[in-house]
Amino acid sequence: MFSYKAVYVIVLREFTRFFRQKGRLVVTIARPLLWLVIVGSGFSRIISLPGDLDYRQFILPGIVGMTILFSSVFSTITVVWDREFGFLREMLVAPISRFTIVVGKLLGGTALSLFQGAVLIAFAPLFGLSVSAVQYVWMFFLMALVALSITALGLFIASFLKSLEGFNVIMNFVVLPMFFLSGALYPVNTLPAALRHLTLLNPLSYGVDSFKHILLRTGGGMAGEFSFTLDIVALCLFSMVMITLASYSFGRRE
């Protein structure tokens, strides 16, 4: 049966595990800032953007997307970890449905990613972007939607894997192309035609684009490359499909 209490316990366990790993917490905050400071500062001297938009401002939505991507995907490594060390078996014999476990893992990964994305947005004023309260609300909604869809993707893949080594190999093969083909570091319309078609299949492309619509509204008038409505619809559809696949796959394989 479905248990809200069990969902709460699973989410709480994910947060407890995250905050106990001090090194992971520091890296989570430091990595995107290093990208913004080092990569952003370096490329800002050789790349010119329309209006008064600085390159560091341009890649901020993409770095937020990167943070959510890495956090969401690698939060699902706990499924493989729990399976390898026997804790997942204990959850499966508990008087709760497997869908409860899936929901707990999804919400745990989504909440952690949302927390990390929110921390990064707090640094936006340091890079010349003033974020209003309305923009913060929109970003929270969009980040939650992106995090939910990517966490579901990670959970779907993790349901097929039996070892941590296999998880790391597969996820790096998935994560890096998703990031570099998302428009995070350069406009999608500058890519060759073949790669541009691949970006249309990448859910992170719509997430990063939706962030640009919200955050770059104050940066020289430059917004996203797709329509905002398309971004929302694509993310919602991908989320629903991946949640369905993750629930079905997890239930069948476990």
Image (cartoon, grey):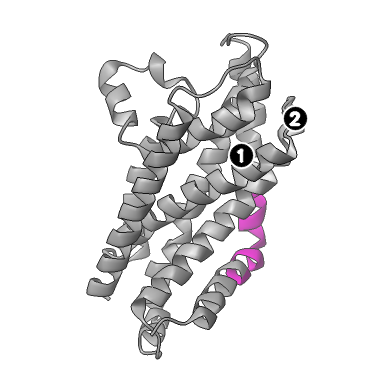
Mark in the foreground, 1 or 2 = 2
> Hey, which quadrant is residue 176 in on the image?
top left
Query: From what the image shows, is residue 132 above or below residue 144?
Result: above
> Hey, which quadrant is residue 46 in on the image?
top right
The residue that disc 2 covers is 130
If the image is split into quadrants, where does the C terminus sit?
Answer: bottom left
- x%, y% of residue 162? 29, 68
Query: From what the image shows, is residue 48 above or below residue 39?
Result: above
- Which portion, as a residue range, is magenta? 16-29
Q: Nearer the viewer, residue 87 or 148?
A: 148
Callout 1 amino acid: Pro
- Is residue 36 left or right of 223 when viewed as pictured? right
- Is residue 98 left or right of 37 when viewed as pictured? left
- Is residue 52 left or right of 186 when viewed as pictured? right
- x%, y% of residue 54? 65, 17
Q: Is residue 168 visible?
A: no
The residue that disc 1 covers is 32
- x%, y% of residue 152? 39, 57
In 3D space, how far apart are the residues under numbered discs 1 and 2 (Cα atoms)? 18 Å
Query: From what the image shows, is residue 64 above or below residue 22?
Result: above
- Is there a contact, CB below 8 Å, between mark 1 and mark 2? no
